[in-house]
Amino acid sequence: MQDKKKNANKKEGLWAIIVVIVIIAIVLLFFLLGGCSKKYTVDFNSNGGSIVEPLKVEKDGTIVKPSDPTREGYIFAGWYLNGELFDFNTKITGDITLEARWTKIDDACTLSCEEGYTLNEETCTCEKVAEDKLAADRTSLTLTVGGSYTIKLTIPSSITDKTVTWKSSDTSIVTVDKNGKITAKKVGTAEVTATVGGQSVTIKVTVKEKTQAKEEEDEDIEVTKVSVSGNKKMNVGESQKLKLTVKPSDATNKSVTWSSSDPSVATVDKNGKVTAVGEGEVTITATAKDGSKESDSITITVSSVYKVTFTAEDMGGGLGATRWQYTVTRDGKTFTDYKGFTIAGHQCRPDGERVKTSEIESKPSSTTITLNNGKTVTASVTYNE
């Protein structure tokens, strides 16, 4: 009897151990499969606008664009990351901070809206109106004394009688004619109402003193990065236009100044076109003009162009077979500052003998010339028969 109890206890203990092992395995599997996946924080720097709370997102996840912040006197221009407009479909792979960009709005917004949209002058944006609702192209308007503006209405198709009645709340400040033309009379605020088929729309009009116009410029956006790319090897006589990238894309002044470290090797014009003029190494630099001092450079190696030309000549005078007369040029000019080169096994020197045409019937298209300074260069070979 005691043996049976001992066996039962052993089995119970064994099952307990198995249960614990299974639980541990499940926990480990949970962690391995991402049960505790890493999350990243997306912060929002509103740059003087209303606060936007940070968001948490799992690795490789995306975030939903939050409501646009507001800032008095400015229009929200978007969220930017590293100087570029942020795409909210981008997968998040680390903690990031998005920065708000703003555009100043003038006292009188001059944005023009299409039919079916109305202008909110406070935010200087066009807002779509319901198809069955009477709407004006502006919800508010700022004029100077003596100025005028003609309101454009969007009248629903459901209204058959499209006769418009216009009314000013204070004709001493603004008047309105039968065509919707509003004229500012004196400083103050008034409302102009248009009524069509039982529907009405009201435009708030603010009249200011006529003063000498003073243009209010947007905040300058400085260049943060300049990148230059192109071919790093050129031959004398060749040209190329370098690729220029200036960030951010909405920088106020994206112009650059181009310069060459050695114009005797290569020149560069105001558009970034490089022309190779002499053998050597040169650095071409683009520097931002906006005062940020951002710049980038590319180093280009310019090589001379060597050519060997063989011309068949009938030597006459009893010399027999036709022979090749050869000349060497560098960058289009006759060149003799070399030790020699080999064509089809035949040694050629600046003062060497002419070569029989039968000796180089294979007519190789290139050869290697040994210069007097010991260096070797590759030359193309042409044949004039």
Image (spheres, grey):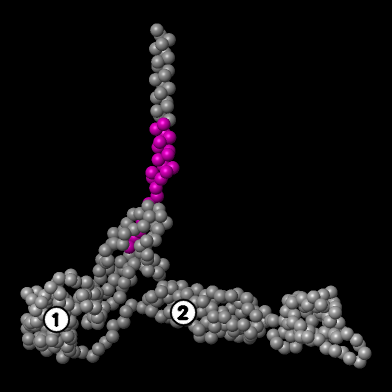
In the image, 369 versus 314, the foreground residue is 314
Q: Quadrant of the N terminus?
A: top left
Q: Residue furthest bottom?
A: 317
Magenta segment range? 22-44
Q: How many marks?
A: 2
Does residue 292 appear to the left or right of 148 in the view shown?
right
Spatial CA span between label 2 and label 1: 44 Å
In the image, 240 versus 254, the foreground residue is 240
What residue do we see at 28% from left, 85% from top? 215
| Residue 197 - label | none
The residue pinned by badge 1 equals: 205
Q: Is residue 226 above or below residue 36?
A: below
Label 1: state its secondary structure: strand
Residue type, label 2: Ala
Q: Residue furthest right?
A: 318
What residue do we see at 13% from left, 86% from top? 179
| Residue 288 - label | 2
Q: Badges 2 and 1: C-beta atoms under 8 Å apart?
A: no
What residue do we see at 70% from left, 87% from top? 332
User: Nearer the viewer's eye, disc 2 or disc 1?
Assistant: 1
Residue 45: x %, y % from top left: 33, 65
